[in-house]
Amino acid sequence: MLAAETELKNAEKVKNFLIQKGLLETNHLAVKELGLIYFPINKKSKVPGAKVVDTKFSFPKKKLVPKVENLLKDKLSNKEIRLIPRSQEIVGKIMILEVPEELKSKERVIAEAYLQINEHVETVVSKEQFHEGEYRLRKVKFLAGKKTKETIHYENGVKIRLDLEKTYFSARSGNERLRIARLVKPGEEVLVMFSGAAPYPLVIAKNSKAKVVYGVEMNPLSHQYALENVKLNNLDNRVAIFEGDVRTIVPKIKKTFDRIVMPLPKTGQQFLSLALKKIKIGGIIHYYSFLSEEEMEQEAKIVRDICKEEGNQIRIVKKVRCGQFSPRIFRICFDIKVLK
Ligand SMILES: C[S@@+](CC[C@H](N)C(=O)[O-])C[C@H]1O[C@@H](n2cnc3c(N)ncnc32)[C@H](O)[C@@H]1O
């Protein structure tokens, strides 16, 4: 079979060239051997940085995954197919669909199609409601596959067991958790307020050399999952989880922290004074809020005013957009350095 042979270090460049010129044979996979990579091509041609060869071996066939719209073309009208939700959250082995009102009567057929094309998904549910109440819980409706709302989610090297309705969890915050973990310096003592099923404490402990990570959560069911997850990841020696309201638990912890994470974007403001009492001078507070672009400056002012009232001097080192709440409202993290 015809192939462009090149060293691994040139792979990206050669592949891009082949794609651009329409030379890459897309039904087969490339083969790596002894520091070289072979891209299957569809005709003899000059390829910069590569030698064109006729290989003796054959290339593995690409598995063709059917598209959801192809599976549904006999069951839904063209208009309905255009409305199918394209981006879904996958938590462990559960896919959460956001089905528009117009497609509600077809949601089970759509769920079956998604189940068929995603080999790692065992259950499909639909989102019935946004996160609500003090515990930030949501309802989901079972649609297809294995009848369960509990799963184990793998993220950033940790396993997180959870039930979608009993504890808050967002797979979409995985990158943000890793961002925080990567900022942690060796030996740091970290506090995660509002720790839920413990994704932040676990990801931080696993991906940094923090001395210890504390978590505080008041939903008893989240707390149970958190305890289980700490064990599941063998992190008992560096992660400690406490159950209760941060307002009563945090003042009782007889230490101050190098870093405090506050993943409660709806009402975080109410807890900033508490965090300031427990942060070391020079420490960082990661403060989350749901904001539009236009509200950022106003929120920064409120943060500065609260810190001033508490007698602290701070610098907002960074404002990071780390999620989306609605088309114009983002999940923003202010990284706040406490100078005094
Ligand atoms: C947005 S969720 C974040 C959970 C977790 N950190 C995560 O990222 O998956 C906020 C969590 O804070 C908890 N919570 C709300 N108010 C609290 C309080 N005063 N003290 C302790 N936990 C609280 C809720 O029960 C909920 O689990």
Image (tube, grey):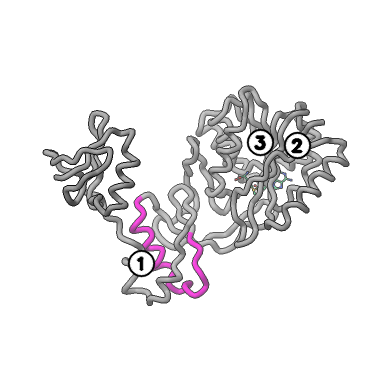
Which image quarter holds the N terminus?
top left
- Label 3, residues with CA under 10 Å away: few <14, some 14-19, many ≥20: many
The residue carrying mark 1 is: 69
Label 1 CB, ligand 1: below 8 Å? no
Check the image and report above or below for 111 versus 21: below
Secondary structure under badge 2?
Answer: helix
Q: Is residue 167 visible?
A: no
Answer left or right for 231 relative to 334: left
The type of residue carrying mark 1 is Glu
Q: Position of residue 159 (x, y in %)?
A: 49, 38
Q: For the residue labelled by badge 3, is the local secondary structure a helix, a strand or a loop?
A: strand
The residue type indicated by label 3 comes to Gly
- 3 and 2 marks in contact (CB < 8 Å): no
Q: Answer with mark 3 or mark 2, whichever residue precedes in sequence.
A: 3
- The residue beneath circle 2 is 249
Residue at image point 21% right, 45% down: 46
Q: How many marks?
A: 3
* Residue type for callout 2: Ile
Q: CA distance from mark 3 to mark 1?
A: 43 Å
- Do the residues under discs 3 and 1 have CB atoms within 8 angstroms? no
**Mark 2 residue's CB less than 8 Å from ligand 1:** yes
Circle nearer the N terminus (1, 2) = 1
Residue 269 horizontal side relative to residue 183, left or right? right
Q: CA distance from mark 1 to mark 2?
A: 51 Å
- Segment colored magenta: 97-119
The picture places residue 285, in percent across and down from the top left corner, at 71, 37
Q: Is mark 3 within 8 Å of ligand 1?
A: yes
In magenta segment, residue 218? no
**Main SS category, magenta section:** helix
Is residue 116 found inside the magenta-colored segment of the image? yes
Circle 3 sits on which residue?
215
Q: Is residue 133 above or below residue 48?
A: below
